Image (tube, grey):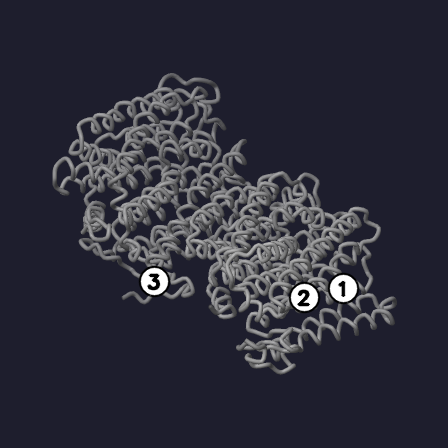
């Protein structure tokens, strides 16, 4: 099939990326000239750019059909439009939650926001990638921005350590990915994902298996899935919480796009090879993530292990090898992003100058110090644990349904049983907040604006938990069989 | 049909009332209390209306509400009640009122949250009993764990964190496998409605797996031996209200689940594995009764007695196959099912009342140790009389509701096998033993010590609560006909479902 067989779309479909790239450059310039005198300017401009970006995506970026642009390097389909919308909104929320935190820590460089925008651009490129080269471009743009962001608090030793680990391991994983891609190219003679999916239809072939194994390893690294998870706890703990928030949420949308474009689309011809690899990776992730989280005392580290376990769930969706599983994985990713945004938002809300609020024990007695915040954190924890009436329940339910539908009853049983183990450490946060005395821990600051957004975020977690149909339907529509 | 969905009202009114109570905040505890009381009374009134309009003599589901909920999963907001679920809904609404009143002047730690948790629980529990869509059922079933987790953990005793974590994880573990079974059934039936799942033909092997997955969920909730160990801990540490709701209603969900899911959805597997349930029930009835005998903690004693009494529920429900095998007809089997349902209602009233009695004593002396009491009747005559009544009802005294359920189940066991009946009837002796011994040590005898001598008799609030419960226990004991009439048609229908094989080609 030639790339021209699909309608090649108008350039307007790429307006979100163009806007993002342009505004990142403009904001950098503005920051150079005015940043030192008007400190909040960069942040305001970034929020403005994101808001306009949402509007532009709504106007031009959504398409009901599949279009190819730039000689088939770039694809615009309903999924791309939806993921970009989601990424814009998640990014704006993340920046909103981060502002006070950055201000208190005197992390004032305008580059912070510019790096956020370039990382977002990297995610967009991944979302719309239709060629191995575009995929690699997106990954590198995203990763390089993230390395710099992790190290942004340059006086913090632990952040520098985290950034170094992240960079070294990330570079290795990029190498692995390139190597895998080169093998695929050598076997098929094409970089185009559409063509790859039609060419690679043969059964197991040693070279193909090795090539796919390298690609899967790189994907597992991006997801932070076992056995490529070692960077996750250190980076989550070491990075400034605002950056951890970014890695845990917005960046996940990029990882989802990566696996969907590369495996579910590009290698759709040989699902047997990679679904088995994903199963092993997913099962190990669930095991290590859930067991590892139990031992943590630092909440960022605990959420890092929880992220590993949740990556296992997303990978299980893909391991089912059926479209229903991909839909479920998308639904899970969105639900996870919404919930995790608020969870880290809560940590940012509770931290103050000179105090990170990153120990689980810091939550002790929150219910008596601030009932509203405690109730919201309760909802978020139960949602992540997968208890109704919150969004996380449906996310897990759909994954399990996809697994049962594709005759993986044992995987489904394993997944639900290990979530019982997982429930324990989420419950521990609730326990500290509700069952322990506050001691001399301070009453959280008021911060009405941030509180308001957090309330909206948590209400979304609950409302979408009581009425989950809309999100399920969207996932079905953007990923038609 | 009805313009107003009354089932929705009885589910969401308490939830809304709970949120209102929460909004009052702990600073305005007085308003919060009144809001809670008014809500629970209104919910009870709405339930009475349901009762008044309920038509006996048909197994059809009534007050049906069916609205699109999650079309993407073919799941609907589908409510309805029959003669098995309505009594349990009435029990739920009825028992919440005493819980609210019993906490009136006793709970001073975060009172608004306390009442809110109980009201939200009430709504969710009624939701469990009225859901006709299995996903909706599971939604309520799991959501209910959250308020109970908080109730035990915030207002409980010294080891409350241990007890509440154990409670949550135990029940969570039980229910996740049920979820897998429900999804499996959905994929076969194409619909999450309970009725569709009940009609779905399944091979014996499939039924067996589903039956075991259900069994774990329901056995933990009932709780059946040997997965009962969470219950004594949860009861001992929970505040009085928590123990009442736990014993009176939450345990009934296990029994209800067996009647609504296990038996009709997997009748052949139930038949094949009935020996398992019957043996576990008999062990619970006999062995746990002896365990109850040696308890020093009053709450623990009642908790163990609850496990033994719930054994009658599971026994009655699963004797059906034995009776049919022994007598060759289904006629006698109805007694077992009737007994199971009556026993659930009766145990709800009696165990709830006993936990309230312990609460009354605990509020005065701050101990549940039996040895700390003695001769309470000398200083608290009104309380002594009521407590003795409930203890006797708990041991199945004729004239009280405890007799009706146990008698029906023992009657059914005679039809199945003499030995079952002998074992089951032995609890009447042991049960009388631990109940009377409890009464002898706590209520009768000379005043044990100075603290007991200073105990005040029941105040008007406490007397009202226990008095109403005593009236209910006696009324159901001497005149169970309204309850039996209400459930008759539904139980007949259930029996028919149980005895119809679902194996494809076997019918």
User: Left or right of A308: which side holds B292?
Assistant: left
Give the mark toward the camera: 1 or 2.
1
Q: What is the chain identity of the residue bearing mark 1?
A: A
B391 and A154: which one is in front? Answer: A154
Q: Give how far across and how far down residue A199 sits, in percent.
A: 55, 68
Disc 2: which residue: A92
Q: How many marks?
A: 3
B481 and B364: which one is in front? Answer: B481
Point out the tag, 1 or 2, that comes first from the N-terminus: 2
Task: Measure the alpha-carbon separation of dots 1 and 3.
Answer: 54 Å
Quadrant in the picture for residue B358: top left
Tell me, yes or no, whether dots 3 and 2 are on the same chain.
no
Q: Give how far across and how far down residue A21 sits, in percent.
A: 74, 73
Q: In this view of the protein, can residue B42 be seen by the observer? A: no
Q: Residues within 10 Å of mark 1 (few under 14, many from 20)?
A: many
What residue sits 60% from the left and 56% below the top? A207
Numbered label attached to residue B5: 3
Give the mark toward the camera: 3 or 2.
2
Q: What is the chain identity of the residue bearing mark 3?
A: B
B51 and A225: which one is in front? Answer: A225
Task: Measure the alpha-carbon separation of dots 3 and 2.
Answer: 42 Å
Indicate the secondary structure of the residue bearing disc 1. Answer: helix
Indicate the secondary structure of the residue bearing disc 3. Answer: loop
Give the mark toward the camera: 1 or 3.
1
User: Left or right of B366: which side holds B218?
Assistant: left
Q: Quadrant of the N terminus of chain A?
A: bottom right
Disc 1: which residue: A115
Quadrant in the picture for residue A150: bottom right
């Amino acid at each position: 099939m030639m790339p021209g067989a699909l309608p090649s779309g108008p350039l307007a479909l790429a307006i979100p990326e163009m806007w993002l790239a342009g505004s990142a450059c403009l904001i950098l310039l503005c920051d150079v000239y005015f940043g030192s005198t008007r400190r909040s300017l960069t942040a305001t401009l970034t929020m403005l750019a994101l808001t306009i970006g949402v509007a532009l995506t709504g106007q031009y970026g959504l398409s009901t059909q599949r279009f190819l642009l730039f000689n088939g390097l770039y694809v615009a389909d309903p999924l791309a439009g939806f993921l970009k919308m989601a990424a814009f909104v998640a990014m704006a929320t993340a920046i909103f939650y981060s502002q006070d935190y950055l201000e208190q820590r005197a992390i004032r460089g305008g580059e912070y926001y510019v790096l956020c925008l370039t990382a977002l651009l990297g995610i967009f490129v991944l979302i719309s990638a239709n060629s191995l080269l575009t995929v690699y471009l997106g990954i590198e743009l995203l990763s390089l921005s993230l390395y710099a962001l992790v190290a942004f608090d340059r006086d913090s030793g632990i952040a520098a350590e985290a950034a170094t680990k992240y960079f070294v391991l990330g570079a290795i994983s990029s190498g692995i990915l390139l190597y895998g891609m080169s093998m695929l190219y050598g076997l098929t003679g094409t970089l185009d994902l559409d063509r790859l999916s039609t060419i690679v239809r043969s059964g197991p072939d040693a070279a193909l298996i090795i090539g796919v194994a390298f690609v899967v390893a790189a994907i597992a690294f991006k997801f932070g899935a076992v056995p490529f998870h070692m960077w996750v706890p250190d980076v989550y703990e070491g990075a400034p919480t605002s950056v951890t928030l970014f890695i845990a949420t917005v960046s996940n949308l990029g990882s989802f796009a990566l696996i969907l474009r590369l495996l579910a689309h590009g290698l759709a011809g040989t699902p047997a090879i990679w679904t088995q690899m994903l199963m092993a990776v997913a099962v190990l992730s669930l095991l290590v993530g859930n067991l590892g989280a139990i031992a943590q005392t630092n909440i960022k580290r605990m959420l890092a292990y929880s992220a590993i376990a949740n990556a296992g769930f997303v990978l299980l969706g893909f391991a089912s090898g059926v479209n229903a599983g991909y839909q479920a994985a998308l639904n899970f990713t969105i639900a996870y992003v919404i919930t995790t945004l608020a969870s880290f938002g809560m940590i940012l809300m509770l931290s103050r100058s000179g105090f990170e609020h990153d120990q689980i024990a810091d939550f002790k007695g929150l219910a008596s110090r601030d009932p509203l915040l405690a109730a919201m954190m309760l909802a978020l924890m139960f949602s992540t644990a997968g208890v109704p009436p919150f969004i996380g329940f449906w996310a897990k339910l759909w994954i399990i349904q996809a697994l049962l539908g594709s005759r993986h009853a044992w995987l489904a049983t394993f997944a639900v049983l290990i979530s019982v183990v997982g429930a324990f450490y989420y419950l521990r946060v609730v326990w500290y907040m509700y069952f322990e005395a506050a001691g001399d821990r301070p009453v959280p600051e008021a911060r009405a604006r941030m509180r308001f957004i957090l309330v909206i975020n948590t209400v979304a977690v609950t409302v979408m938990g009581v009425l989950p149909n809309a999100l399920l339907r969207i996932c079905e529509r953007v990923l038609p069989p | 049909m009805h313009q107003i969905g009354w089932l929705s009202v009885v589910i969401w009114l308490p939830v809304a009332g709970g949120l209102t109570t929460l909004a009052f905040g702990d600073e305005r505890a007085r308003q919060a209390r009144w809001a809670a009381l008014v809500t629970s009374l209104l919910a009870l009134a709405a339930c009475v209306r349901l009762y008044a309009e309920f038509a006996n003599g048909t197994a059809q589901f009534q007050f049906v509400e069916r609205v699109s909920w999650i079309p993407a999963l073919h799941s609907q907001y589908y409510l309805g009640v029959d003669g098995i679920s309505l009594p349990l809904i009435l029990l739920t609404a009825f028992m919440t009122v005493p819980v609210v009143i019993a906490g009136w002047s006793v709970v001073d730690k975060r009172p608004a949250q306390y009442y809110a948790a109980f009201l939200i629980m009430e709504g969710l529990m009624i939701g469990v009993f009225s859901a006709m869509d299995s996903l909706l059922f599971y939604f309520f079933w799991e959501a209910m764990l959250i308020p109970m987790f908080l109730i035990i953990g915030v207002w409980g005793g010294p080891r409350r964190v241990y007890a509440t974590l154990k409670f949550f994880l135990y029940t969570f573990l039980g229910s996740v496998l049920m979820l897998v079974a429900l999804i499996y059934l959905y994929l076969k039936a194409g619909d999450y409605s309970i009725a569709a799942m009940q009609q779905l033909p399944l091979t014996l092997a499939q039924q067996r797996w589903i039956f075991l997955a259900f069994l774990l969920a329901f056995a933990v909730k009932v709780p059946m031996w040997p997965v009962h160990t969470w219950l004594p801990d949860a009861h001992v540490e929970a505040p009085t209200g928590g123990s009442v709701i736990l014993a009176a209603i939450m345990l009934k969900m296990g029994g209800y689940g067996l009647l609504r899911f296990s038996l009709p959805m997997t009748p052949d597997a139930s038949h094949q594995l009935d020996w398992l349930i019957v043996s576990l029930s008999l062990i619970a009835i006999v062995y746990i009764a002896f365990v109850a005998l040696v308890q020093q903690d009053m709450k623990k004693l009642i908790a163990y007695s609850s496990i033994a009494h719930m054994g009658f529920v599971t026994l009655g429900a699963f004797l059906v196959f034995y009776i049919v095998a022994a007598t060759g007809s289904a006629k006698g089997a109805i007694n077992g099912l009737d007994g199971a349902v009556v026993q659930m209602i009766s145990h709800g009233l009696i165990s709830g009342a006993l936990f309230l009695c312990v609460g009354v004593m605990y509020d005065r002396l701050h101990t549940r140790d039996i040895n700390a009491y003695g001769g309470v009747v000398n200083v608290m005559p009104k309380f002594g009389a009521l407590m003795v009544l409930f203890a006797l009802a708990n041991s199945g005294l004729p004239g009280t509701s405890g007799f009706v359920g146990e008698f029906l189940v023992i009657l059914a066991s005679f039809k199945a096998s003499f030995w079952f009946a002998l074992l089951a009837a032995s609890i009447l002796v042991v049960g009388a033993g631990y109940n009377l011994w409890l009464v002898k040590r706590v209520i009768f005898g000379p005043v044990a010590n100075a603290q007991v001598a200073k105990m005040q008799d029941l105040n008007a609030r406490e007397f009202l609560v226990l008095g109403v419960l005593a009236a209910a226990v006696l009324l159901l004991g001497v005149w169970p006909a309204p309850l039996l009439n209400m459930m008759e048609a539904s139980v007949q229908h259930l029996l028919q479902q149980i005895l119809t094989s679902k194996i494809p080609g076997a019918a």
